[in-house]
Amino acid sequence: MTDVRAAEAGPSGTPAAERGQGAPGGQDRPDVSAYGLADWLKWAWRQLTSMRIALVLLFLLALGSVPGSMLPQEGTNPAGVQQYYTAHPALAPWLSRLGLFNVFGAPWFAAIYLLLFASLVGCVVPRTFRLAGSARTLPPRAPRHLTRLPRSAEYSTALVPAQAVDVAARVLAGHGFRLRRPAADGGADGDWVSAEKGYLREAGNLLFHLALLGVLVSVALGGLFGYKADRLLVQGDTFADTQSALDEFYPGRFVTAADLGPFTVTLNQFEASYITSGAQRGQPSSFDAQISYTTHPGGPARTDNLEVNRPLSVDGAKVYLIGHGYAPVFKVTDARGQVVYDQATPFISGSSGNFLSEGVVKVTDAQPEQLGFTGVFVPTAVEINGILQSAFPAADNPAVSLIAYAGNLGLNNGVPQSVYQMDTAGMRQLTPQPQLLLPGQSLKLPGGQGTITFTGYVPWVSLAITHDPGQLPALVCGIAALGGLLLSFMVRRRRLFVRARAGGKAGSPQGSTVQVGGLARTDASGGFEEEFASLAAELRAAHERAAAPIPAGHSQHEGE
Amino acid sequence: MPVNVALGHVSTDFLIAALVIYSLSVVAFAGDFAFGRPRRAGSVARVQARERAAALATVATAGAAAAGPGNGPVNGTVDGPADAAVAGPDAAPAVPDSMPEVAPPPLVAIRQAGRWVEAAMALSVIAVAAHTVAIVTRGLAVHRAPWGNMYEFVTALTCVAAIFFLFVMIRYRAWALGVFVMGAVVVALGLAETLIYTAAGQLVPALQSYWLSIHVTAMTLATGIFFVAAVLGVVYLAADRYNRRVAAGRAEPGNGIMRRLPTTEQLDRLTYRTIVFGFPVWTFGVIAGAIWADEAWGRYWGWDPVETWAFITWVLYAAFLHARATAGFRGRRAQYIQLLGFATLMFNILVVQVFITGLHSYAGVS
């Protein structure tokens, strides 16, 4: 692609040829100490923009990406990072120090791609000027011996040399070649025409590299001015896109909570359907979240269906359906007989499949002591060897299994707690065994501490809300890169030369001998050979036509 | 829509048939090595751009090239007026011209290559047809693009590789490479059939998108093309190693297999052009994947493990394209780079998608 980068010398050797251009004075074997800082900088810049270093940087980029896929990353899998810390307590801090849990945000990774892009700029910008220059200059003069070129043809014609070259020039101009003819007084050099075509190749190459830069800028734009947020929404609930209503909020550097669009989303109903038979039993076949939304609180409500692969665009942001689960509904009465808890509690499914989900119920208002429950929800309960399992992801036979605690939930000690975990340090277990409840069933807590009733379940969905102003620029740049790539691969830069010398080949004094020579400066996709053969045949046919007797009343050569 | 099980079986039957016929074509290609007329790969006159002899080759030189297994310019007609004129009937009479060679049409070239190649090509075409029918019927059976899981992906990419290589083989008259590429197709398809066979089925909702047809199709095409490039790369390395051993006096020149292969320059150029074809397709596949990721997951690029490895593959093939233009990296090193690129591609498909949990865990291999 970037075959214009000169083949350069080894990094340490810095032979005279290369050095001679860079160092003022241009000594042959210079004393290293004779170089000033400017010379070293020049040398470093030339090294950086050399193809060899670009290759090395490409390798480093590929190599550096590998740990990003092999180790859990904070951006995509924070839970995995925690697990890694637990599993490898000695190693993990070191990996973290090296940025290996956040490879794609690590300074060393940024160093690689920034150097690569610097190298790219250093290569591409000078070439842009060179391209602009070459677009104004004419093709080179035709060499003397065209049969020495990679492609050549030779034939004789009855036309005199000047006529033959005129005809050839007309044919080549008709194919869009840029032409060069000898200067008016350049008769000594004979009759020739040079033709060149395919300047778009280099333009495509430049477009490709510049578009890659554009992709980088777009990504940065999204990182600085965009945001990502997550929200778990239980069926029947509403949330507004404000920072306090979001579970997680990852703003870009220049984004504040005020930049959030104040739309609201309500989950009216969520349905998941599954394949019920065959080898794929249990595999989901469709998800459908029926929502209503307003672009600002109090605005007119509209309805929509969120599906996987079908996000909602609202107020400059996009809302995606990225997960779902079950929220069992519990009703808790405390020792006084008061209902102190009556709500759907989202349980989170682990990796064990079929939506065996775990969660906690924290009853802070219970008297005289706070109550807490850790539980497991299974949509289709079966018992295998005394262990509660889920046989199917749909809620065909829902059940929960609970362990009750009483004591202090520890919510007032200032340490933030996850709503999905319970700190049992200040609590005592009330039920020695997990207690299984079916919908409608209650568990009476020992010692008159109260009652918990499993009244039913509702589904929940997890939504991702994103706003990325770099998205469209990235797409445009990506398409431009592809277009540039195709141009640079499909267009070949090639030159054709035609010379005509007086005298036919077979001893005939009339007419002339025509030589056609061609070379492709780049021919990535092949095919110059065929093109040359067809052009040579066309030139020859044109010469034959021009030399043939023409019906009366038709002038033979307008150009003469 | 329910899966059409009967049609799924038809698809499987056609695939088995294709596998058998591919194997027969490999046997025929091998038979050409063993019993065919000795000749240098027919592409010699067409591909060696640097040899101007080739440019000047006339009908007469084409015959000379076919006869001579040597490495250099094999014809004595470079400047000679002995060239047979190929001019049309209305050309000036008896003028010794040299016009560029016009290659014989593919069917003629195949016939000239001998019985074994004729048989191998016929079998290859039939096998590709059966393979294509298998994929189309699978698609009709499941009402979607038939590359939704690993098994389907491998069957589709081998079909792309076979079709693409048929094209390459005919265009460059590279019959001698058939045994290697079709052999690799047989191995890949056979492994898919025995190890990861998955019955026709529905897709998870995440894959129910028209982007599956766009993104995965592009990835399948590119993988099939890179597959061919990788086989060519291995052949290149074998030929290059042999040449160096001969140069060092550690191997006998004139090895029966080696002298039938295209020259290393030809293999290098063929590999380059194959990758030049595949790289934009891969780039398009990555961009299409990014658009789909934006639709499905809310970001166009998130360094998901499969995305990361697709990026690594892209970077390595880009490195190959640059290496070919860099002194000191041409030839063998460039081939190592592209083979490394293909290795990362295979690693992505066989290891990352199956064993590393990410958003792309759709392989359907248990």
Image (cartoon, coloured by chain):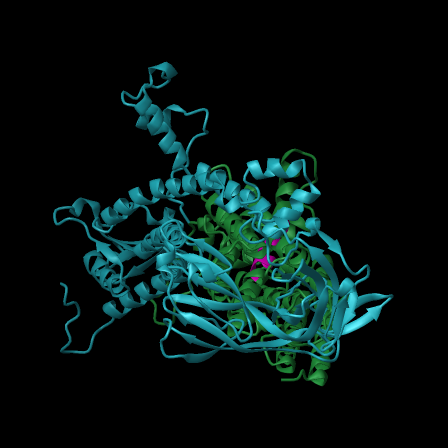
Chain colours: A cyan, B green
Please count the marks in the image.
Answer: 0
- x and y percent of residue A154 in the render? 35, 56
Q: For this rendering, which residue is in front, B287 or A219? A: A219
Q: Quadrant of residue B121?
A: bottom right
Please indicate whether residue A1 sits to the left or right of residue B157 in the image.
Answer: left
Q: Quadrant of residue A26?
A: top left
Secondary structure character of the magenta stretch overall: helix
Residue name at image x 46 percent, y 29 percent: A10
Please indicate whether residue A138 sits to the left or right of residue B144 in the image.
Answer: left
- x and y percent of residue B161 in the render? 60, 64
Segment colored magenta: B225-235
Q: Is residue B40 visible?
A: no
Q: Is residue A61 visible?
A: yes
- x and y percent of residue A40 in the render? 35, 24
Please indicate whether residue A356 sits to the left or right of residue A61 in the image.
Answer: right
- x and y percent of residue A70 in the render? 62, 48
In the rendered image, which quarter contains the C terminus of chain A?
bottom left
Q: For this rendering, which residue is in front, A520 or B62? A: A520
Q: Quadrant of residue A45?
A: top left
Please indicate whether residue B151 sits to the left or right of residue B166 in the image.
Answer: right
Question: Quick check: is A480 in the magenta stretch?
Answer: no
Up-down: is A8 above or below B210? above
Residue name at image x 42 percent, y 65 percent: A241
